[in-house]
Amino acid sequence: MTREDAAVELPDFDIVANLLIEEGVLAVSPAELHGLLAGQLAAGARFDADTLLRVFLELMDVSALKQETTKLGLIELYQRTLAQYESDDFDFALLLPDDEQMLAQRAEALGSWCSGFLSGFGLHTQKAQKLSAEAQEGLQDLAQIAQIAADTDVDSDEDEADLMEVQEYVRMAAMLMFNECNRVPESESKAAEKTPPTLH
């Protein structure tokens, strides 16, 4: 794998926000939408293009997408999120406003992302009881962070550092869930090793 292949970046937050605005989507923010998608993928869900678009319609609470660019943008968001999860370089990222935005806005978006992740994870996981203690604690922490609220009048370096620390924790927690719920069970991987490849 070349370095170029390894570095997968998410579409820009503002681009996704504009797609949603053009579609008249008011029920969900880009951060929450990405959290919902990331939660479903972490729980083991995979979609073909048609199913994926139906899932997005449901998540966004709209009956149809008007723009072809929206469909392509959402498929790209799915593909890149999955590619980041599967990367060996820990490339997984959260779709959040960039650092130029107000701290309060970014904190609120992080809370929305966590809320979306928990909803998406809950939609698909049957494995909550099988998660490690660390992963279960991570889910509880995400539920706390989903309630996050920053003081809109404060934008100090200390608050900035705190937010970055929480954001990194959320990122690592999401990767932990993905790794736990998407591992091939040992019995299956051993069976696969013993099964000779089929010749076509």
Image (cartoon, rainbow, N blue to C red):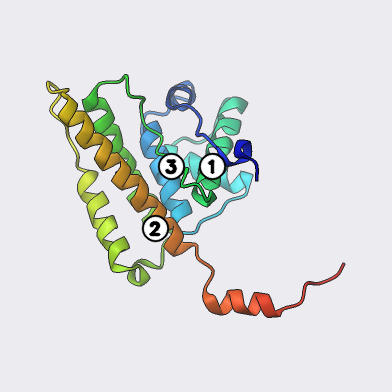
Helix, strand or loop at mark 2: helix
Residue 89 x/y as whole percent: 50, 47
Disc marking residue 177: 2
Discs 2/3, front: 2
Residue 162 occupies quadrant: top left
Q: Where is the C terminus found, in terms of image quarters?
A: bottom right
Helix, strand or loop at mark 1: helix
Amino acid type, residue under disc 2 in the picture? Met
CB atoms of marks 2 and 1 within 8 Å: no
Mark closest to the chain's N terminus, 2 or 3 = 3
Q: In this view, does 115 lie above or below 70?
A: below
Amino acid type, residue under disc 3 in the picture? Leu
- The 10 Å Cα crowd at callout 3, few under 14, some 14 to 19, many 20 or more, is some
* Marks 3 and 1, how far apart at CA: 13 Å
Observer-nearest residue: 98 or 89?
89
Q: Mark 1 points at which residue?
A: 78
